[in-house]
Amino acid sequence: MNISVLGCGRWGSFIAWYQATVLKNKVVNWGPEGSKSYETLKKEGKNEYVALDSSIELTCDLEYAVKFADVIIISISSQGLRGFMEKVTKYPVGNKIFVLCMKGIEESTGKRLSEILLESGIDKNKIAVWVGPGHIQAFTKGIPNCMVIDSYDEKLKRFIADNFKSNLIRFYYGNDIIGTEIGAAAKNVLGIAAGVLDGSGYVSLKGPLMARGAYEVGRFIKAMGGEFTSAYGLAHLGDYETTLFSEYSHNRMYGEMMAHGAKFDKLAEGVMTAKAMKELGDRHGLDLPITEAVYEACFLTHPFDKGDGAENCMKIILKLFERSTKSEF
């Protein structure tokens, strides 16, 4: 199978590595010329996460990468997907399968990422999403994990999961693409909240954050047309360890550094997802206290001010404890 991985950052380079070294597929890994991630791989043949197998063809030629592939896996910043698809669809893609290995909600529209592909003209039955727990640093040491493949099309879902599985990644078939996508995106918002708790010395509150967070996200998923219980699957609750507790989690680290009045300089998708979820919640009349607290901490304070900013950030999270008493469920 010919695989093109579009994106050569942290997850893109790992996916290329996994497809080539574990699954033995023919792989092209595309990155934008001049970008730090692409130039590092071109010069060194590796980055801080993986060393590219010699069989992987690294390219900055998008047309070549698109035409090469039977399956196109996209792993870029979620907020850039719409503009990126305008470039991809300049080339013939009618017979291509697209797999999104990225997590987010478009801030400007509130759209899920698969919806952006649909609006870009991609056939509904050729779109799948690949999400769930796992850190590259663990995978490359041979430590296995479970992930999920979901799709609008049952046959495609099974085809991708059955062909991408290995002793390193056990795949499950998702059964609610709305819940799978929203859950995967929303767990990054919870990761920021967890980081704030870590940075402020309130680590024991991460247990309640997990429980109440999953319940909040379940209600949000249901309001968006998905299944409430999807919040308790691999895409969301199943990914909590790698997002709310791991030293490798970008979103958790973003929150921790924010609590100290410092800025984390790597991509934390939960920031813009919190904004998108907050705006969707307002539109649908939903009470999303944790999401709103993260949004307020990220956008309505000066969180990178080592003085008042850091203190205000923690006050916002602790305001959740001032809410009136109510039934748990």
Image (cartoon, grey):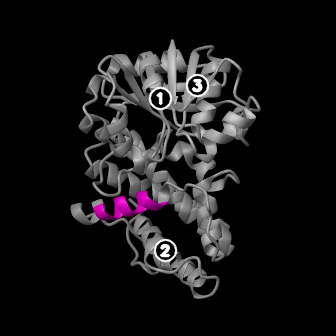
Q: Nearer the viewer, mark 1 or mark 2?
A: 1
Residue at mark 3:
170
Does residue 139 sit above or below 314 in this rendering? Answer: above
N-terminal label among 1 and 2: 1
Going by the image, does 156 lie left or right of 190? Answer: left
Residue at mark 2:
297
Residue at mark 1:
73
Which residue sits at x=57%, y=57%?
251
Identify residue type, mark 3.
Answer: Arg
Q: How far apart are the two marked residues, 3 and 1, measured between alpha carbons?
A: 18 Å
Going by the image, does 259 lie left or right of 84? Answer: right
The magenta stretch spans residue 277 = yes
In the rendered image, the quadrant that contains the C terminus is bottom left
Q: Horizontal and vertical percent for residue 176?
A: 34, 35
The magenta stretch spans residue 179 = no
Residue 272 visible to an observer of this rendering: yes
Packing grade of label 3 (10 A; few <14, some 14-19, many >=20) is: some
Which contiguous range is marked in magenta?
A: 271-279
Q: How far apart are the two marked residues, 1 and 2, measured between alpha carbons?
A: 33 Å
Q: Secondary structure at mark 1?
A: strand
Which residue sits at x=27%, y=36%?
120
Identify residue type, mark 1.
Answer: Ile
